[in-house]
Image: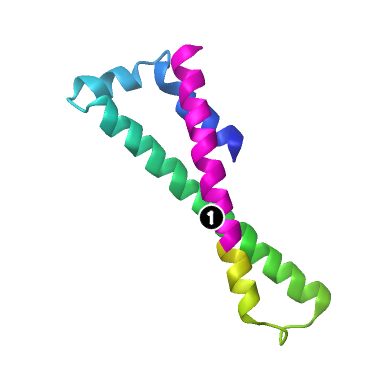
Amino acid sequence: LSVFVCSYCCSENGKNGIMKNVYSKGFSREKVFFAKYILSFLYTLVVTFSCFILAFIVGVILLKNVDGFSGKIFINILIQLIIVVGIHGIIFAIATKIGKSG
């Protein structure tokens, strides 16, 4: 996930001039920045939920115990989701900073 976010954010100055075309169409740098942020955020959510579902399926197959649900599992998933969103913001900020300076 970190590799995708970093490579997507730092690829603004590509050799093929795609970003120059986007800017020449009248889109501001802020709009492009927020579009990149939203796209990478949605990608993060898709990957996170895919991992949650895969972990649930593997857990059910290996443990064969489905009747042990409680409210704690949803709180744990929510906390993990909040942590992933925070980490995404930090990685996006670092990748943007590296892309502008390096």
Is residue 55 shown above or below 32?
A: below
What is the quadrant of the N terminus in the image? top right
Q: Is residue 64 magenta?
A: no
The residue under label 1 is: 82
Residue type indicated by callout 1 = Ile
Q: Which residue is drawn at 46% across and 41% down?
A: 40
Task: From the top left corner, tell me how far across and down residue 50 is, in percent.
Answer: 59, 59
Toward the left, the furthest residue is 26
Is residue 6 shown above or below 39?
A: above
What are the residue bounds of the magenta stretch? 79-102
Task: From the top left corner, tell me how far across and down residue 84 is, in percent.
Answer: 57, 50
Task: From the top left corner, tell me how far across and down residue 65 is, in percent.
Answer: 77, 83
Q: Residue at x 21, y 28 (%)?
A: 27
Is residue 34 shown above or below 82?
A: above
* Helix, strand or loop for disc 1: helix
Crowdedness near tag 1: few (<14), some (14–19) or many (≥20) residues, C-alpha within 10 Å: few
Q: Residue at x 33, y 21 (%)?
A: 19
